[in-house]
Image (spheres, helix red, strand yellow):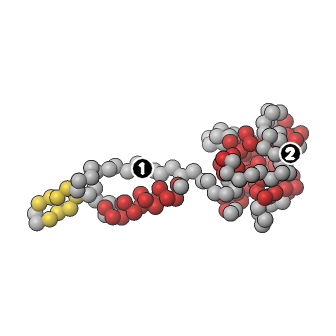
Amino acid sequence: MGMLVLCLVACCLLMDGGSGAAAASGGQEVHSRTPDMRMPGYLYIRTTGRCTPQFWSSGREPWPNTVPRDSSVSKVFGSRLLERYEPGLTLLEATQRNDDIGGSAFSKLVKQSSAALLNAYSRPGFPYSAWEIKSLVLEALVSESSAASQAEQFKQANEACN
């Protein structure tokens, strides 16, 4: 849907010529019937591919039986996660988190690693295996920089996956 909106905006700008819908004709200025629309200085695009946390939290596809939606992240990834996350945090809640934007690296890590784990179980050819993801998450818990780096690697893998 985001790409459709982006394409429509680009087409409108190309058809208008980016000139604000005014043209010179015979020495007189002719204005179109549509008002001059000011475009925002940015376009916000939320990545919603088939492997992102947003996709998994939407419920558009059944989750793998191996990891039910209500499984706690500490049971799935290991009890060491209790040092950083509340005990009741489920995989579904981890994919739904929105505190990863401007939040801590650990918030980003739990969100992206949860999606990566679901992808490992359900997407053939995903670059990480389930055990590899679980191990990498535990290793990344040692510091903010490790968590940020690993979260970014999972994010790239999640967004590149189809």
Return the disc, 1 or 2, that comes first in the chain's sequence: 1
Percent position (x, y) of residue 157? 71, 59
Q: From where the camera sits, is residue 137 visible? A: yes
Q: Are marks 1 and 2 in contact (CB under 8 Å)?
A: no
Q: Is residue 70 above or below residue 5?
A: above
Q: Secondary structure at mark 2?
A: helix
Percent position (x, y) of residue 156? 68, 58
Amino acid carrying label 2: it is: Val
| Side of 97 where 68 appears, left or right | right
Which residue is disc 1 drawn over? 41
Mark 1 to mark 2 CA distance (whole Å): 42 Å
Q: Residue at x 40, y 48 (%)?
A: 40
Percent position (x, y) of residue 6? 47, 58
Viewer-nearest of labels 1 and 2? Answer: 2
Which residue is disc 2 drawn over? 76
Amino acid carrying label 1: it is: Gly
In this view, the residue in front, 141 or 38, is 38
In this view, the residue in front, 79 or 123, is 123
Crowding near the residue tagged with mark 1, few <14, some 14–19, many ≥20 C-alpha atoms within 10 Å: few
Q: Secondary structure at mark 1?
A: loop
* The quarter of the displayed image where residue 29 is located: bottom left
Looking at this view, name the residue that lies furthest to the left: 27
